[in-house]
Amino acid sequence: MKLPNRQVLAWAAYDWANSAFATTVMAGFFPLFFSDYWGGGQSQLAKANSLSSLAVALMAPLLGAIADRGSAKKRFLFSFAALGVVATCGLYLVGRGDWPAAFLLYVLAGIGFSGSLTFYDALLVGVAKKDQFDAVSALGYSLGYLGGGLLFTLNVAMVLWPGAFGLENQAEAVKLSFLSVAAWWALFSIPMLLWVREPSGGQPLPLWPAVRAGWGQLLATFHHLRQVRPALLFLVGYWFYIDAVDTIIRMAVSYGKTIGLGNQDLLTALLLTQFVGFPAAIAYGALGKKVGTRLGIFLGLGVYIGVTVWSYYMDEGWEFYCLALAVGLVQGGVQALSRSYFAQLIPVDKAAEFFGFYNMLGKTAAIIGPMLMVVVEDLTHNPRLSILSLILLLVIGGAFLWRAKPAEPG
C-alpha cells in the first residue's frame, strides 16, 4: 500500500489538531464546567451552541466565495484557528460564577473551529487528486477521532485523579485541559502551515464583492438543486436529522448532568463513544453495502430515536454507558452513509458545487435542536421532555429521506 505523502499527512494533521476542541471542550468539559463552576445552565449552553452555529451559517456563503476564489485559503484558515485557540485559552482565565464570559468565549471558539474547517475542506483539492479524495478525507476523519480521543483520555485522567498530576483539584485540572487543547490545536496546525501548498485559483475578491459572489453562488446552487428533486429532498431531510445528531453530541453531557448523573460516569461514557466511533464507522460502511445505503441511514436514525426515548427514562450511570455505546456505533456510520447516498443522487458534473452546499449544511447543524430543547424546557420546566423534542427533527428528517429516492434510469 502506498503511504501518504508529506503534504497529505500535513493536511490530515489539522483534523488531529482541531478535533481536540470538539472532544475535550465542546462535548466534554465545557458543559460540565459551565454548570458546576461558572454557574450556567443547560438553557444557556443550548443558546451558545445555537448562536455559534447560526453565526457560521450566516458567514458560510462569504467563506465559500473566499475559499473558491484566490489564494488566501491558508491565511483565512489560520485566522479562524487563531480565534479558536485564543478563545479556548481565555476559558482558563474565567473566574468562578462568570458564565457570561465563558458563554462569549465558547461562542467565539466555536466560530473559529467551524470557520477554519471551511478552508480546511477547500484545501483538499490541492493536496490530493480527484480519485484520492475519499481516501484522503477518510484519513483526516480517522486522525481526528484518534487525536481527539488521545488528548481527551489524558484530560479525563487529569480531572479524575488531579493529585497524580500535581494539581490541587478538579477545577484546576479542567482549566489546564482547556490550555492543553489550545496548545494541541496550535502545535499540530504547524505541519499545515509549513507543507500544504496553496492551490492556484482565481483572483481574490474584496469583502463586499465576495459577499455578493457568495450569495450568488448559493442561489445558483439552489436553483440547480431544484432541478434534481431527490437531492433537494435529501438535503432538507439531512439538515433536520443531522441537526438532531449534532445536538445530541453537544448536549449529552449537559443533559446527563441536569438529571443528576455523576461527572465520572459522563466523562468515561464520552470516551467510550470516541473510541467506538472509528471502527464502528468502518463496519457501518460495510453494513450499508449489504442492506443498502438509505436503509443503513434509517437504521441509524432508528437507533437515535431509541437513544432519545431511553434518555427520557434514564436514571443510572450504567444506562448512560449503554447509550454512549449505541451512539458510538452509529454516529460515524450515519455521517459516512449520508455523504455516500448524496453522491448517488447528484449529477457527476455538479458534484463539487452540490457538495459545497451539503458541507455548509453539515457545518451549520445544531441550530434548531438546542433552541428546541430550550423552548420545551422553558414551557414544561422538565429537562427530560426537552430531550424528547429531538425526535421531531429525526422523524422529519427521516420523512424527507424516505421521499429522496434516486430517479429511475430513463
Image: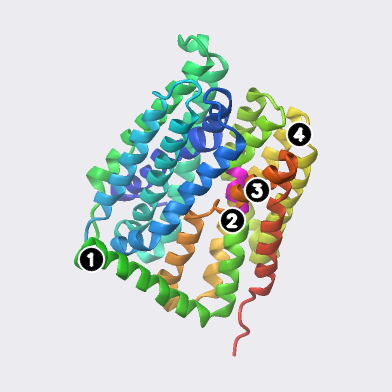
Q: CA distance from mark 1 to mark 3?
A: 45 Å
* Residue type highlighted by circle 4: Glu
Vertical comparison of 46 with 355: above or below: above
Q: Dots 4 and 1: beta carbons under 8 Å?
A: no
Residue 328, placed above or below residue 235: above
Name the amino acid, label 2: Ile
Give the residue pinned by disc 2: 242
Q: Looking at the image, do the residues carrying marks 3 and 2 touch, with CB atoms under 8 Å apart?
A: no
Q: How dense is the environment of label 1, judged by Cα within 10 Å: few (below 14), some, or many (20 and up)?
A: few
Q: Secondary structure at mark 2?
A: helix
Numbered mark located on residue 319 in the image? 4
The dot on residue 181 is none
- Which residue is drawn at the image coordinates 38% and 47% (left, top)? 12
Q: Is residue 194 left or right of residue 148?
A: left
x then y, percent, for residue 265: 67, 26
Label 4 – label 1 distance at C-alpha: 52 Å
Earlier in the chain: of badge 3 and badge 4, it is 4
Q: Earlier in the sequence, mark 2 or mark 1?
A: 1
- Type of the residue with mark 1: Gly
Task: Write down the residue under mark 1.
Answer: 201
Kindly report which numbered mark, 3 or 4, lies closer to the viewer in this rendering.
3
Q: Which mark is residue 375?
A: 3
Point out the tag, 3 or 2, that comes first from the N-terminus: 2
Q: Secondary structure at mark 1?
A: loop
Crowd around label 3: few <14 · some 14–19 · many ≥20 (10 Å): some
Q: Main secondary structure of the magenta part?
A: helix
Instruction: Report whether residue 188 is seen.
Output: yes
Q: Position of residue 47 (x, y in %)?
A: 54, 44
